[in-house]
């Protein structure tokens, strides 16, 4: 029998006799069972049960692709910030791949691709025998088989999490055994039963590795030649397909390689390229003229490194970093952190962020012009973050540092960091910063929640011991001399109203307010606005926290101020507007959760006070520099020693926090000057720039009017307590609806131990619930008797305990001669015995 007349079983029998190894039978078992399937593309449509159940992971279009994060311009145009991938791949359609590439792949890798049913029998038998004989993987696999192998390798990367799992899976998918070859052949035949040839070729070109992390012909064309898969030339197409055969041998990004480098014209790749060009000519895919021109073309790669990671996002890098942490942390993207990271890097997400480039650019400009990256050895930090009121969308986020996650880069200077100063620790941030007096707004909220009014007064005098504070969580708290806060301007304080304390940020005023409140309630009110410690620990609720000693992320404070501006409704932050998958379908994204933090009347009272704090109080410098202006609220904050300074505020549309912080050390910002001016006032130069841009773009409406009950408590007269005992005074005040505050001992004409005076004074009106400061007399003063009209001797007798200075004055009436016309101090004035009293004596001349 001639060779040409031998059947498939005869061929196999001959091979078995030649090799003498039973494993070859396993390799070719599929061919024995269904020789027609292996030999003919017609058989690919046959119904054979063993091939009907194709694994889902072999489905076309399930490839690992890079994910992208975008910002959006005003006209809706997406602007790429950064890409992320384990495999640099951009999947393309058949129409987006040059015919040169498709013809080169078929001619060079599988000339009978359009004829067989998934297996090139001749090549497979040769490859299998050589594999078994040498232990090395040999050629012979069809394009469909190569696609199957690549899918199995891809499955290792998409389904495995740890490096150990990936490696074990990879070894299983590529092991040089007969069992693997049989599996690959079986799956290849099944694949051709289900999908058209052109789809398989397209996906083969999309999945194939081109060296390193470059996968797919589109990414390869971009990386090696700075072009697209559609636009590659004939010689470029052949060079790219050459790489697929053996990437480590034929890739073009090692110009110094001795065997395949620039000096020898990339000889190894050229040899394979020219072979492929010859096969293309052989199978009439190109003309002789095209062949000659391509052969003569030198290989000149244009290596174009793909951008990856947030370091490519420039001034938007820290916001980009925040988005990646949302993708890593949120359960919407996977059951655990590792799965979420893999899904992001391999899922082909197009993430469209909330970043407003107009506000972001304004924020970047504000920081760049006012806060240096480093300053005379001081590791200074500058932050700006803006959120949209009512939605929680993060509109701007920047800081005064260069972004890098590379420790070696960070070690080159304090201008580099990978820490996002605006966010929580779990979202790439720090452990937070003390917000200072901006935190006082939560005491204001609790004050109004508990029924107090803005014009209600409290004892706001400095004290060495504030006594006991109420705390429903942990019980009454006393701090003694360990808690004796001062006011910023050094004033000793008086009976300030809540409104005055807010406008001028009076520390002792807010401590006095807290004395009437529940410290635990203040903490819970802050929590209701989304406030939490940046490191995840629970909020504390000591008296000191009233003044802003908790360590909180600036983004958290921006969200809280947005909640105040939103009629007391706080919306959690979001940074992703939508995500589109590789198939064009939108994916579920984390939604903002909006909650009613305080009732609208309370919020209206807060905005009433905070508008005045901004326009006429400690924030007026920022207010005056903002243009255009819309109704806005604001609150300043300064930490102990002027270490950190803040300006926080909002319109009804946008909330912004700007701050200068000491990352290390205790620099006094009031004694430090940048090129732009005093460090402590940089916040007032930055905040207006951002809010001016926000007001111009988003506008703003009036805040709701505060009710009369929030503004003013019921006014009632303060009882006249002079001369009463302190215990009696306390009882009378509480019975009238006031709080008793001990003002200490003062000089007075009232009997020692009795009430000398009150603030407000007896007989005046004050809001119900106000603190009335009671002063005790030490009895050291005497009320001057009235001696006006008395003769000189009588007057001197009545003033015997005082030093008298007599002065004569001419009078026109004889009866005034020798009598006291006037006295100073006036009659009734309390003075100390021995004080000088001036008497004016009448003198009549005939």
Image (cartoon, rainbow, N blue to C red):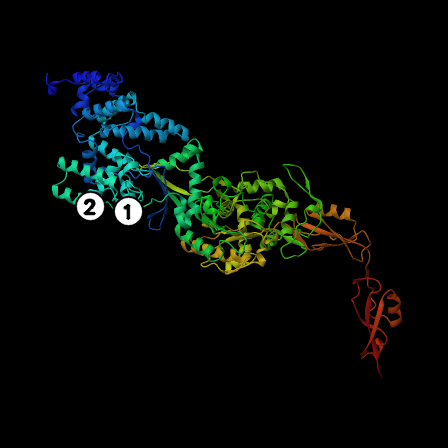
Between 408 and 454, the residue placed more toward the observer is 408
Q: Residues within 10 Å of mark 2 (few under 14, many from 20)?
A: few
Compared to 19, does 827 lie above or below?
A: below
Report the residue marked by disc 2: 297
Q: Quadrant of the N terminus?
A: top left
Q: Residues within 10 Å of mark 1 (few under 14, many from 20)?
A: some
Q: Quadrant of the C terminus?
A: bottom right
| Residue 786 rendering spot, x and y as whole percentages | 82, 66
Compared across the picture, whether 44 is left or right of 669 comes to left
Between 762 and 541, the residue placed more toward the observer is 541
| Residue 612 rendering spot, x and y as whole percentages | 55, 55
Compared across the picture, whether 792 is left or right of 662 comes to right
Q: Secondary structure at mark 1?
A: loop
- Mark 2 vs mark 1: in front: 2
Number of numbered callouts drawn: 2
Q: Secondary structure at mark 2?
A: loop
Compared across the picture, whether 145 is left or right of 613 comes to left
Q: Dividing the picture into quarters, in which one does residue 542 lie?
A: top right
Q: Cα distance, mark 2 to mark 1?
A: 15 Å
Instruction: Point out which mark residue 361 bears.
Output: none
| Residue 440 rendering spot, x and y as whole percentages | 58, 48
Between 157 and 268, the residue placed more toward the observer is 268
Compared to 55, does 221 lie above or below?
A: below
Between 818 and 833, the residue placed more toward the observer is 833
Q: Earlier in the sequence, mark 2 or mark 1?
A: 2
Compared to 434, does 616 lie above or below?
A: below
Instruction: Point out which mark residue 302 bears.
Output: 1
Residue 389 visible: no
Residue 185 visible: yes
| Residue 288 rendering spot, x and y as whole percentages | 12, 41
**Contact, mark 2 vs mark 1 (Cβ under 8 Å):** no
């Amino acid at each position: 029998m001639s060779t040409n007349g031998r059947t498939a079983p005869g061929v196999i029998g001959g091979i078995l006799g030649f090799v003498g190894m039973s494993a070859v039978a396993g390799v070719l078992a599929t061919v024995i069972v269904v020789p027609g399937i292996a030999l003919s593309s017609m058989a690919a449509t046959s119904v054979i049960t063993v091939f009907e159940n194709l694994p889902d992971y072999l489905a076309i279009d399930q490839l690992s692709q890079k994910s992208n994060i975008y910002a959006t311009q005003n006209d809706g145009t997406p602007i790429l910030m950064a890409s992320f991938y384990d495999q640099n791949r951009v999947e393309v359609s058949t129409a987006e791949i040059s015919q040169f590439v498709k013809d080169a792949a078929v001619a060079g890798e599988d000339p009978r691709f359009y004829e067989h049913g998934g297996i090139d029998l001749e090549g497979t038998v040769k490859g299998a025998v050589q594999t078994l004989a040498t232990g090395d993987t040999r050629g012979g696999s069809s394009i469909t088989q190569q696609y199957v192998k690549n899918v199995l390798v891809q499955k290792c990367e998409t389904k495995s999490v740890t490096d150990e799992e990936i490696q074990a899976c990879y070894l299983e998918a590529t092991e040089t055994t007969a069992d693997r070859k049989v599996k690959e052949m079986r799956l290849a035949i099944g694949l051709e039963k289900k999908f058209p040839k052109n789809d398989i070729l397209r996906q083969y070109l999309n999945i194939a590795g081109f060296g390193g992390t470059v996968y797919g012909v589109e990414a390869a064309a971009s990386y090696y030649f700075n072009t697209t898969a559609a636009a590659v030339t004939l010689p470029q197409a052949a060079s790219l397909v050459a790489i697929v055969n053996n990437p480590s041998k034929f890739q073009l990004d090692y110009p110094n390689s001795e065997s395949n480098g620039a000096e020898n014209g990339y000889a190894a790749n050229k040899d394979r390229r020219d072979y492929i060009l010859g096969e293309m000519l052989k199978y009439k895919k190109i003309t002789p003229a095209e062949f000659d021109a391509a052969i003569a073309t030198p290989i000149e790669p244009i290596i174009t490194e793909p951008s990856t990671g947030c370091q490519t996002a420039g001034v938007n890098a820290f916001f980009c970093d925040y988005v990646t942490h949302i993708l890593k942390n949120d359960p919407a993207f996977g059951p655990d952190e590792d799965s979420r990271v893999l899904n992001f890097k391999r899922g082909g997400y197009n993430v469209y962020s909330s970043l407003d480039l107009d506000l972001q650019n304004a924020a970047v400009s504000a920081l760049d012009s006012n806060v240096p990256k480093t300053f005379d050895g001081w590791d200074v930090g500058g932050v700006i973050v803006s959120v949209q009121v009512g939605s929680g969308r993060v509109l701007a986020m920047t800081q005064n540092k260069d972004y890098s996650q590379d420790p070696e880069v960070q070690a080159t200077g304090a201008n580099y960091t990978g820490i996002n100063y605006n966010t929580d620790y779990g979202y790439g941030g720090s452990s937070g910063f003390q917000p200072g007096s901006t935190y006082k707004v939560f005491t204001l909220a609790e004050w109004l929640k508990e029924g107090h009014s803005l014009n209600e007064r409290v004892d706001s005098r400095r004290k060495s011991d504030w006594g006991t504070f109420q705390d429903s969580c942990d019980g009454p708290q006393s701090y003694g001399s360990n808690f004796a806060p001062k006011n910023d301007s050094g004033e000793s304080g008086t009976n300030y109203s809540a409104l005055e304390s807010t406008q001028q940020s009076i520390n002792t005023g807010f401590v006095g307010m807290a004395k009437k409140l529940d410290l635990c309630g203040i903490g819970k009110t802050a929590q209701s606005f989304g406030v939490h410690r940046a490191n995840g620990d629970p909020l504390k609720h000591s008296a000191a926290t009233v003044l802003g000693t908790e360590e909180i992320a600036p983004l958290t404070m921006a969200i809280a101020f947005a909640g105040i501006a939103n009629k007391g409704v706080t919306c959690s932050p979001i940074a992703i507007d939508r995500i589109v998958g590789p198939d064009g379908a939108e994916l579920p994204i984390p939604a903002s959760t909006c909650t009613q933090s305080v009732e609208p009347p309370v919020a209206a009272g807060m905005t009433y006070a905070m508008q005045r704090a901004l326009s006429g109080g400690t924030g007026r410098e920022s207010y005056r520099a903002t243009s255009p202006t819309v109704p806005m609220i604001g609150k300043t904050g300064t930490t102990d020693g002027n270490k950190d300074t803040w300006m926080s505020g909002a319109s009804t549309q946008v909330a912004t926090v700007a701050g200068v912080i000491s990352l290390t050390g205790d620099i006094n910002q009031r004694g430090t000057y940048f090129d732009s001016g005093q460090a402590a006032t940089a916040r007032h130069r930055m905040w207006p720039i951002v809010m001016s841009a926000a007001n111009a773009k988003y506008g703003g409406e009036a805040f709701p009017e505060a009710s009369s009950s929030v503004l003013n408590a019921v006014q009632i007269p303060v009882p006249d307590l002079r001369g009463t005992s302190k215990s009696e005074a306390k009882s009378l005040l509480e019975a009238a609806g006031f709080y008793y505050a001990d003002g200490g001992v003062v000089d007075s004409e009232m009997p020692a131990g009795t009430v000398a005076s009150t603030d407000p004074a007896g007989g005046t009106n004050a809001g119900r619930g106000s603190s009335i400061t009671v002063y005790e007399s030490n009895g050291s003063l005497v009320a001057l008797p009235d001696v006006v009209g008395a003769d000189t001797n009588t007057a001197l007798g009545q003033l015997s305990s005082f030093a008298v200075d007599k002065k004569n004055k001419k009078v026109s009436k004889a009866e005034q001669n020798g009598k006291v016309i006037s006295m100073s101090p006036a009659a009734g004035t309390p003075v100390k015995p021995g004080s000088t009293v001036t008497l004016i004596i009448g003198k009549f001349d005939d």
